[in-house]
Each structure stands twice: as C-alpha cells, then as structure tokens.
Image: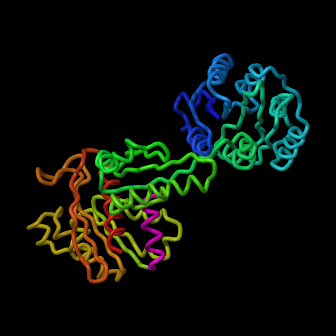
C-alpha cells in the first residue's frame, strides 16, 4: 500500500522545531511494507490542509497526519479530515473520561470548553488513546482510503504508533521490508560505489543504496519479501559479499555510531582508556563518555591545549616543541607516553594538530593532526591530513580517526 505523511504546524514551516516525526514514520512504514510516496508540511490552515489531503489520496491508500489535534482554535486537523472523509465530529465518551482523569491526576484545575474539543472524534473513527498526553488519535476510512491522525509531540506520537497504530496497520500488510545499514570509515562514497557497482547495476531485490555522512559513509541493503525470514536471508547474502570486498572499512553492520562500537569493545575486553587532547579540546572524551556503561573503563581525559599544559601535565620536552613544533609526531608520541606514565591505562591516545580555520602551514593545513597511540607494547603515531576549513567538522573528523585507530588495534 502507498502512504503519504502530512506534518501539520506553522511552527515547523517557521523552523522553530525540527520535524523528527516524518523520519520516524517513514522508517516504520517501510518496515511494515508500505511505500511512502510523499512528505508534506502544511501550516495551521484548513483549506491548504484539505488540498494536501485530497491531492495525496489520488495516489495513496493511506495518509498519516501529525499535529493539529490539540485544544486551541488553530488545531484543525480533525475538522479537516472529517470534511474530506464525509463524517462529523461527536463526543467520544471514553476520551472525555480519560481527559478528566488526567486533569485530576495532574491538578490542571477546572477544564475549559476548548479542552473538551480534544474529546470530539469522527463518528466512524477507530480511536487511539493517548497514554502520554491529552489528545487522542484516530483512524477513519472512506471508500477504501484511510486517514490516520496522530498527535504532534514526538513522544506522544511515537508511543501511540508503537502501541496502537502499528497493529492497526498490520491488517493491510502485503509484504515486509527488512534492511541493514553498514557504516564505513576511511573510504569515500564514490569509491564504495565503484567497488559495488556491479551489485548496484544488477540489483532487483535486495536493493543497495550508498549515503554520505559527515566523515563517514553508509550502505543500506533492503529486501521486500513475503516474510521477514526470507527478507533477512536475502540481505545476509548481499552483506556477506560486501564484507568480502570492503570489510576492512566497515565498523558497524547494524547502523551503530562509531563511539558505541568502540565503547562496547572496550567494555567487553575490560580495557581501561585515557586520552589527552589538544586540537579537539575534549571532544573525544565527550564523545566516548556518551556511551552507556563506559565508566567501567574510561579513566580520564586531559585537555592540554597550550604548550605549557603539555609540558606541565604530560612532561613533554620543551626542546621537542621548540625543534619540532607543537604540531609534530614527536610531540604526539611524548604526549601519549606521558599520559601512560600518569595513568597506567591499558590504552592511551593523544592528539595534537590544527583545528582551523586558521593556523598550520603549507604542508600541515587546518584539519591536520597527529594521533599518538599506546596499547600493550604497541606504540605509534598516525597523521591525519586536513580536509577542509570548517573548524567543527575538522574536530569531528579527528575524533572519528581516533575511534578508528582504537577499533583497528584492540
């Protein structure tokens, strides 16, 4: 079946909030085997919303709206759907009772008439109770076409979809879609595509799609079959072939963030880690400590931004800085050695370089850095070559390189 997602709310058009609802719904609908043809965003305007609904229904079997179910005058999604689907609003007594219970539990005080607007539902609707808010959702049918209206707040919408709407939609399932996303570092999108071009050119099912992301790339393998088991088996065959060709660049086969992959490895192997950072200014430590449970292995992160800090905290030789400059492989090595003497961590990693957009020199442009690494008896320095002039992107790319070095060497 074909679907259209319609996000309702002037605040989305103004850029005041990020529309995460459409992303979530597209993923969920695809997994259920629905083809999402359109994403629409429309302000709080009844006539424009009506036009979008009618236009979507020409091509689609189902429209799903988010937003516009609240108590205020500009919340008009129900009214508009009712008009298009030739129904009328009536009081839904279970929703009225639920609203009054919520008001009592949360000490809202006396409910006003506009609050009760949320308890009006299309007379033919299947109503979805809102476990996290006051505005129920619903599904409405006319001549084989369906409208599903969901609340706008993402927490309310996702819970309603997961607990109620998903089961409602399963009655329309003709097939299922499964997919796996492989994450790559150290190889660009065009190079990955070149390595896989024969698979891509000859694809029917499963399908292969490449995506570029900041500092890394992804390949999504998807299959649409009669059963989840069939789809997963088909995907596994393609993933195996991609692994044979590009396995050295894959850091995740399940769409995990790089920090999550490395963090899990450290925890599983019970390897303590410390870091000392210059140009990244603590970003590596912040990224790694975002992983749940990392406190079991993360010892400390030291930001030694100045020459004095490197000398005081890590005992880098001032002569090394003077002769080789602070942006050198020698300084990176002395930093990591000093860190090991200070912490005794199983893994020690350092970085010194130029974040940009200014600084550096002709052969060491902004975005360049040296990373020192020590694990067991292994110690080495890796150079990162600068890629652009954007300071934030440079630092994020450096952190990915640090994670890559750890991932490859433990």
Residue span colored magenta: 256-270
Q: Position of residue 326 (x, y in %)?
A: 17, 64
Q: Residue 228 in the image: state x and y as whole percent.
A: 61, 53
Q: Is residue 383 left or right of residue 195?
A: left
Instruction: Give the quadrant of the N terminus.
Output: top right
Q: Residue at x 45, y 58 (%)?
A: 257
Taking the image as shown, residue 101 lies to the left or right of residue 144, namely right
Rendered residue at 74%/33% (across/down): 70
Q: Residue at x 13, y 52 (%)?
A: 361
Q: Is residue 317 visible?
A: yes
Q: Residue at image x 85%, y 29%?
A: 124
Residue 224's place in the image compared with 185, above or below, is: above
> Magenta-highlighted stretch: main secondary structure?
helix
Q: Nearer the viewer, residue 274 or 235?
A: 235
The quadrant holding residue 40 is top right
Q: Is residue 204 above or below residue 239?
A: above
State which quarter of the image contains the C terminus. bottom left
Residue 23 vs residue 228, the one in the foreground: 228
Using the image as rendered, state which of residue 169 and residue 403 is in the foreground: 169
Q: Is residue 208 left or right of residue 11?
A: left
In this rendered view, identify the residue nearer to me: 109 or 345.
345
Q: Where's residue 285, x and y in %?
A: 40, 65
Q: Magenta segment: does it hold 120?
A: no
Q: Is residue 86 left or right of residue 166?
A: right
Find residue 126 and report its horizontal and vertical position in percent: 82, 36
């Amino acid at each position: 079946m074909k679907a259209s997602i319609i996000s309702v709310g002037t605040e989305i058009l103004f850029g005041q909030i990020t529309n995460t609802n459409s992303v979530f719904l597209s993923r969920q609908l695809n997994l259920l085997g629905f083809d999402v043809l359109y994403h629409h965003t429309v302000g709080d305007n009844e006539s424009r919303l009506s036009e979008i609904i009618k236009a979507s229904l020409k091509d689609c079997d189902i429209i799903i709206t988010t937003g516009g179910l609240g108590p205020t005058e500009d919340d008009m999604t129900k009214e508009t759907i009712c008009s298009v689907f030739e129904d009328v609003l009536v009081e839904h007594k279970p929703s009225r009772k639920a609203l009054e219970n919520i008001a009592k539990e949360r000490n809202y005080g006396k409910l006003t008439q506009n609050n009760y607007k949320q308890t009006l539902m299309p007379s033919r609707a299947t109503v979805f109770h809102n476990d996290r808010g006051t505005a129920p959702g619903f599904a409405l049918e006319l001549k084989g076409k369906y409208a599903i209206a969901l609340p706008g707040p993402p927490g309310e919408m996702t819970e309603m979809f997961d607990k109620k709407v998903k089961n409602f939609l399963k009655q329309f399932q003709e097939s299922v879609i499964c997919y796996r996303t492989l994450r790559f570092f150290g190889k660009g999108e065009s190079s990955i595509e070149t390595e896989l071009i024969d698979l891509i050119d000859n694809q029917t099912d499963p399908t292969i799609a490449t995506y570029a992301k900041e500092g890394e790339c992804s390949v999504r393998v998807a299959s649409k079959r009669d059963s989840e088991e069939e789809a997963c088996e088909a995907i596994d065959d393609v993933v195996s072939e991609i692994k044979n060709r590009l396995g050295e660049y894959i850091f995740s086969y399940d769409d995990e963030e790089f920090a999550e992959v490395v963090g899990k490895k450290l925890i599983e192997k019970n390897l303590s880690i410390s870091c000392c950072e210059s140009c990244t200014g603590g970003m590596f430590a912040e990224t790694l400590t975002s992983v749940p449970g990392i406190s079991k292995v993360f010892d400390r992160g030291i930001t030694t931004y100045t020459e004095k800090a490197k000398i005081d905290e890590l005992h880098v030789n001032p002569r090394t800085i003077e002769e080789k400059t602070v942006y050198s492989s020698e300084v990176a090595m002395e930093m990591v050695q000093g860190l090991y003497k200070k912490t005794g961590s199983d893994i020690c990693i350092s970085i010194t370089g130029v974040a940009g957009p200014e600084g550096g020199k002709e052969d060491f442009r902004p975005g360049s850095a040296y990373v020192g690494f020590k694990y067991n008896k292994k110690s080495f320095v890796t150079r990162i070559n600068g890629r652009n002039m954007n300071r934030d992107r440079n630092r994020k790319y450096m952190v990915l390189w640090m994670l890559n070095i750890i991932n490859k060497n433990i």
